[in-house]
């Protein structure tokens, strides 16, 4: 139980800091920390394959992509017509409204989820091995698996075309 | 938590692995300089200690006494964090590598423990995951130094590492098809014995192309020659660790050598039969393991001082256009073979 | 032992944090990062339910969600790069050409 609270606290804290940081590089690094904590939670949920895939794909590939883009753009921090000294989360107008909406959302969700009555601890299910997942992927979900490969191909082509510099002849 | 002999043995084993990795980095420093010298027909270190064997000690002492510099415009937190990430990932990857058979240490323990810090049943994937985390040390080092050589070197080096991770993973996948398990201990135990009592059942004989792809991708992953353009002295001053000095620089060096040791150890476990070998009883199998890892490390050093360096675009073209299709074809052929011969 | 409710509440909190990020922040990259937080919260819900119901389907869906998230991050970042090239700014409030 202690491990659950530790990982949960790390992921929530890191996510809060992600949206509160001005510097986008720190945001990306904090999100990586949050993903690491989530990976620990997946291990607690008897899903070692998903935990390792989370590190390989999310923390190891997608976040590297984000980091490269942040470094490539070398973007200045957010400047708006608002006063630079006021923290982004405290600015008036749409931001306060957005913050209020988010708080309302979290209250609603927590209410909806805990209204269903207390559920007991997990049943002692077997640990899903990688073999089980592999078998399912190639039999029941084979179509979705193949479609995913086409999706990735489309995303690759799209990303290359979109990010290319236009050459004016 | 009761203090059982098993617990004590495991803690001692963990510390032992840590210390031995540090030692191996020191030994690699010496081996590299001596072998480089002999290849280049000169003597190498010979003053410090017998045959120059205390040279790494002298290097470490020198590095510890150097001044720790930090460029003023560098981002302090990231500048300090980057070598820590590199070194931590290098050490952590070795935690799931087994280096010997189960042993009871000659009867001191009641039941055998595995010579492995953590026996995870997805060990192969864990190594891959930690290798992909090691990219961050380099890219953050390049960025936080706030200097153009570092940034270019860091970006190039990390782009190279993530490109060659794909072929690395495909070669791993081909071994998984043959070995039928994700746990390194199981894969090694698959390779016990010999065919016709002569040819050991190592996977390198079943998967020769896979072994070559794995070693090539491993050399590129660890940024060693001939794939070390991002840290080449002639081109980029020193790449991503230009601005680092003293112990931070030492951490990067340490991370590089330990990554080499890890790649060699994983290749030994996957392809060369781990700790199985003729003439030595099973409980001393770690001797064979050391011999095989030593041979692969010698191969690493030999490659560095024999082959010329690839230019960066040649390197990336090789990784994407030659090595990746080759590894995919290898995977397909392996799958066909497993299907036909029934493993 | 954590129960299913604990995991669901945690993922609800993470989802709300992601939503707050999308509403409040005025930096395109941080908005994309908040979307990733939301996707991860959803992944956690799936895995938790999969474990509670004893089926591996939760993990399969997570596999697909991760793939889709990767594809979307790649394309989203490519769009951000081309937008930045156009206007040298990452603030969504500067891209107002389609406003009427």
Image (cartoon, coloured by chain):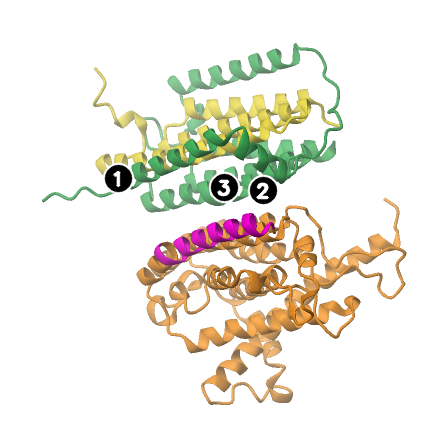
From the image, tell me which residue sits under label 3: A57
Q: Chain of mark 1?
A: A
Which element type, helix, strand or loop, lies under badge 2? helix
Q: Chain of mark 2?
A: A
Q: Locate residue B29: give its quadrant.
A: bottom right
Dot 2 and dot 1 within a common chain: yes
Mark-to-mark CA distance, 1 and 3? 23 Å
Task: Where is residue B9? Give x, y as percent.
Answer: 82, 58
Q: Chain of mark 3?
A: A
A33 relative position to B159: left or right: right
Mark-to-mark CA distance, 2 and 3? 9 Å
How crowded pointer 1 is (Cα within 10 Å; few <14, some 14-19, many 20+) is rated as some
Magenta part of the chain:
B321-342
From the image, tell me which residue sits under label 1: A161
Q: Colour of chain C?
A: yellow
Is B207 a magenta residue? no
Q: Pointers 2 and 1 in contact (CB under 8 A)?
A: no
Q: Which mark is residue A34?
A: none
Residue at the extreme left? A169
Task: Where is residue B148? Give x, y as percent.
Answer: 33, 58
Residue in the picture at 64% in, 50% down: B123
């Amino acid at each position: 139980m202690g491990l659950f609270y530790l990982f949960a606290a790390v992921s929530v804290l890191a996510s809060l800091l992600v949206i509160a940081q001005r510097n986008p590089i720190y945001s990306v690094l904090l999100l990586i920390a949050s993903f690491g904590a989530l990976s620990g939670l997946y291990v607690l949920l008897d899903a070692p394959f998903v935990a390792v895939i989370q590190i390989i794909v999310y923390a190891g590939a997608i976040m590297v992509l984000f980091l490269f883009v942040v470094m490539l753009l070398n973007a200045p921090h957010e400047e708006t017509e608002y006063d630079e000294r006021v923290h982004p989360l405290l600015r008036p107008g749409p931001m306060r409204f957005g913050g209020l909406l988010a708080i309302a959302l979290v209250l609603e969700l927590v209410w909806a989820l805990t209204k269903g009555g207390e559920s007991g601890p997990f049943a002692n299910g077997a640990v899903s091995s990688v073999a089980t997942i592999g078998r399912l992927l190639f039999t029941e979900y084979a179509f979705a698996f193949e479609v995913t490969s086409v999706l990735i191909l489309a995303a690759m082509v799209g990303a290359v075309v979109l990010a290319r510099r236009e050459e004016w002849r | 938590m009761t203090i059982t002999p098993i617990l004590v043995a495991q803690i001692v084993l963990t510390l032992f692995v840590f210390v031995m990795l540090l030692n191996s980095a020191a030994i690699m420093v010496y081996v590299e300089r001596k072998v480089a010298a002999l290849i280049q027909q000169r003597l190498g270190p010979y003053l410090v200690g017998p045959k120059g064997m205390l040279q790494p000690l002298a290097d470490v002492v020198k590095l510890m006494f150097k001044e720790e510099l930090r460029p003023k415009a560098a981002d302090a937190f990231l500048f300090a964090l980057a070598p820590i990430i590199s070194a931590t990932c290098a050490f952590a990857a070795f935690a799931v590598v087994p280096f010997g058979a189960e042993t009871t240490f000659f009867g001191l323990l009641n039941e055998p423990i595995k010579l492995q810090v953590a026996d995870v049943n997805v060990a192969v994937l864990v190594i891959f995951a930690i290798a992909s985390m090691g990219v961050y040390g380099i890219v953050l080092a390049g960025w936080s130094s706030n200097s153009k050589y570092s940034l270019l070197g860091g970006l190039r080096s990390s782009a190279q590492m993530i490109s060659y991770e794909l072929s690395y993973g495909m070669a791993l996948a081909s071994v998984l098809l043959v070995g039928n398990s994700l746990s390194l201990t199981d894969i090694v135990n698959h390779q016990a014995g010999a065919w016709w009592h002569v040819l050991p059942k190592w996977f390198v004989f079943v998967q020769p192309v896979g072994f070559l792809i794995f070693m090539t991708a491993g050399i590129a992953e660890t940024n060693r020659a001939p794939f070390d353009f991002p840290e080449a002295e002639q081109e980029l001053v020193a790449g991503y660790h230009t601005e680092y000095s003293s112990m931070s620089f030492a951490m990067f060096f340490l991370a590089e050598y330990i990554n080499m040791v890890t790649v060699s150890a994983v290749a030994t476990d996957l392809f060369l039969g781990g700790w199985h070998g003729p003439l030595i009883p099973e409980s001393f199998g770690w001797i064979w393991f050391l011999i095989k890892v030593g041979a692969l490390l010698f191969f690493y050093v030999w490659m560095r001082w024999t082959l010329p360096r690839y230019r960066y675009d040649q390197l990336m073209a090789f990784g994407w256009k030659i090595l990746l299709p080759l590894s995919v074809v290898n995977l397909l052929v392996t799958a066909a073979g497993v299907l036909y011969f029934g493993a | 032992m954590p129960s299913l409710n604990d995991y669901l509440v945690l993922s609800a909190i993470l989802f709300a944090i992601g939503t707050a990020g999308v509403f409040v922040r005025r930096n395109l990259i941080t908005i994309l990062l908040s979307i990733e937080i939301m996707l991860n919260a959803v992944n956690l819900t799936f895995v938790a339910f999969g474990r509670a119901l004893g089926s591996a389907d939760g993990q399969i869906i997570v596999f697909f969600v991760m793939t889709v998230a990767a594809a979307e991050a790649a394309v989203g970042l490519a769009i951000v790069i081309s937008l930045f090239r156009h206007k040298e700014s990452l603030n969504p409030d500067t891209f107002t050409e389609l406003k009427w």
